Image (spheres, helix red, strand yellow):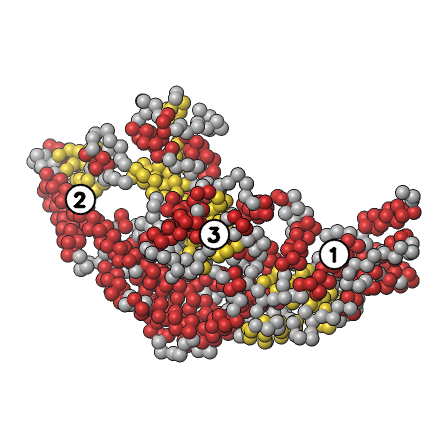
Amino acid sequence: MDASSPALTPAANDIPADATPMMAQYLDIRSRSGDALLFYRMGDFYELFFDDAVKASAALDITLTRRGKHAGEDIPMCGVPFHAYEAYLARLIRAGFSVAICEQTEDPAAAKKRGAKSVVRREVVRVVTPGTVTEETLLDAAEGNFLGALALLGGGEGALAGVDISTGELVVRSTSAATFSADFSALPFSELIIADVDAPPAEWRGILDAVKSGVRLTRQAASTFDSKSGERRLREAFAVAALEAFGDFSRAECAALGALLSYVQLTQAGKLPALRPPKRTDKSALMLIDDATRASLELLKSAGGGREGSLVGAVDRTVTAAGARLLARRISAPLTSAAAIDQRLSSVSRFAEDKRLSDDCRRLLRGAPDIARALSRLALGRGGPRDLGAVRDGLLAAQSIAALLSKVDLNDELKNAAVALEARDAGGFSGLIRLLKEALSENPPMLARDGGFIARGFDPGLDAAIALRDESRRVIASLEAQYREATAVKSLKIRHNNVLGYFVETPPSSGDILLSGPQAPMFIHRQTLASAVRFTTGELADLDGRIARARDEALARELAIFADLTGEIVARAEDIAAAAEAIAAIDVAASFAILATEENYVRPVIDETLAFDIRGGRHPVVEAAGRRTGAAKFVANDCRLGDERGPLLQLVTGPNMAGKSTFLRQNALIAILAQAGGYAPASSVHLGVADRVFSRVGAADDIARGRSTFMVEMIETAAILNQAGQRSLVVLDEIGRGTSTFDGMSIAWAAVEHLHDRNRSRGLFATHYHELTALADRLPRLQNVSMRVREYKGDVVFLHEVGPGPADRSYGVAVARLAGLPKEVIARAGEILKRLENDRKRTGAMDDLPLFAAPAATPAADAGEDPLRLAVKALDPDGMAPKEALEAIYQLKSLLEPD
């Protein structure tokens, strides 16, 4: 059968009578695995058959072979080695597949006891999806990996729940169509579960379509989202009679959490990770930042998709994986409570003011493995000895950090962290640490089946088995010497393989000595090869059996101890998870402190006013990049908004390359960094808490959804104008540039008025429409500022300084020259510019623009004034592209023609 025409995997009830027992078992398991590809364990390989094999071989670029027949056709087959399956699994998950892992649940010897033709029992032990990955090699140590569930109930009630099964973190919050983008973007989701209904509510359809572009959307039965069932699942998962101790959950929140737990149990064969109690996030407790703003400000990823060039990449000085993840979470979802922010800042100050404490703490933190992820793997039955070692070393580090912190005065946040590090409220970790130190070898292997991870002296039974094994090996070495002496064959060796066990091996030239000499009765021929002849002896066979039994006994004993140690750890899961959380929080505080020292950041003043007073502000990412490349020192700038009588909105003008976009972004980033609990790149910062940050900076289209650059710009601007409030911070750049001059200017003009009069948000609005600067004469809380430029010997020097007042020119031709346009083009552009400027001076057309005379409400045209005259007055020759000028001519011509 050709690979291009895959065989349809037969159903379980379509198993032919002549199917082998193995294939019958495979088809039965496959019929219960849904849409997932089935990794069917056979010895040292995971095999795939039928359609699964065709799909996997194409996705993985591996050989497609055949094994047996079904309905007269060859059965397609491919496989991946068990010891390297994770790399193949990662590629399949990235390609959009889910994978069901089917393992052997008994050994072949046990199967034979049930009958000579019995097949080894196999079961699906889990289904791997983007949101349920736990393998260390498949996860980014510095990023979380959340599985989400969206519950939509009647009356518009909605909730979003999320779980990171690699750490056990469980969160929930209410949501709506208006806030979902910000709610969803606050966590690093890789998969979202929704109810499988014919059609979601109309207002959610576009939202869910947008989610599909970056996250796996998984549909589950609508009954999974029943709120009462969800409440029951929560009580069972946490073994509580009521949920009040965790918070007051709404019906939608119970539904979302219940659906989440149901899906985790479905994919983990009934198991749950070591879950933390669910945290309910109050919508007003966190700053809302929608997806467009995150992309615009490059909070977690740069425009190129990497961490480098992002805000988190520039400010991260953490030394633990958990700390890096927590830092990203805090930047992604800053606080809105001034008191809570101040607690975080006080933690940073404690380390910033005591360099020795900071250095000692960071040294200890470097020795702390990723406890949370090790704990989750152990709880799910997928951990290994190395995970036991990670818990041991992590708790030792936690104990040492707690001892260090006990010597100094601490604020409340660090006090609570110190208590969690030692689990003081639960009897401490000393007993568990002592047990793990005594039981484990210093560097345990990754896999339990490799053995050798239990320390000598911990278990007498294990020591006895190991002694027997090792003594038998010494006896074999002695036997080898005896056999050499008895046969006079100096090259005789005793070797071992999995087929023959221990055997005597000689070169072919010496084989006859053992076969026909005086020792022939002692040596039993086993195998002749081109390069060797192999024998055994009764004594050697007896030793082989003893060694095998000792080896099996030692491994069985180690595995039993492993299970006991895992049980001890899982029994303390909640305390260990709290300690891991404390390690992360301390790491973030110390990280911000070292950042402040290295980069000259300051502690911001955060309160409940509407202040926005940044003195000497700097862009954290641009400054860091400039330092790496040896660029000139970053030029700091002030930004003052929100005073009682001062400006709420600044209109920023100036040429391209002067730094307008950098200035806009840096102020938004400073606000986010400060409310995340970090010091800020400035000489002083005083901020009234912002509940939302909106940013529309840069141009991008959305071709997949049929949206032009201008359409995307208008959608994002609409979201800002419809949602921004008095406590919001808004930065807008070049609104209206994607359409004709008049259309764009009109939109920008109206947007400025709306922000000033209706939203009353603190904001920065950058524009190339210099005509808008006259709005400051009639909008009392609008201030003109501009990027300073100096001309020197015909060249333009960008000072990157922000000063009061509007820009006087655009310097577009000068920027074009810097960009390398041909000299003749630059010269011609200069001639045209001069002529247009002269024409404007002569006609004074721009002085008569209705923009400057218009009241806040759009005025109706004067019925008595000639429409042609009005249209000519509105023309801006200096700002028109050739195509726009041609369109204007046709428009004027239409005014002369009768209807």
Look at the image and tell me in which quarter the C terminus lies: top right
Marks 1 and 3: which is nearer the front?
A: 3
The numbered mark, 1 or 2, whose residue comes first in the sequence reads 2
Amino acid carrying label 1: it is Ile
Residue drawn 47% across the image and 52% down it? 252
> Which residue is label 2 attached to?
548
Q: Are marks 1 and 2 in contact (CB under 8 Å)?
A: no
Residue drawn at x 55%, y 71% as measured from the top left = 680
Spatial CA distance of label 1 from label 3 is 39 Å
- In the rendering, at what x and y percent does residue 886 appear? 84, 48
Q: Which mark is residue 272?
A: none
Q: Secondary structure at mark 3?
A: helix
Front in this rendered view, residue 226 or 827: 226
Which residue: 36% across, 31% down? 27
> Which of the marked residues, 1 or 3, is nearer the chain's N terminus?
3
Find numbered disc 2 in the image and state the secondary structure of the residue it sits on: helix
Q: Which mark is residue 747?
A: 1
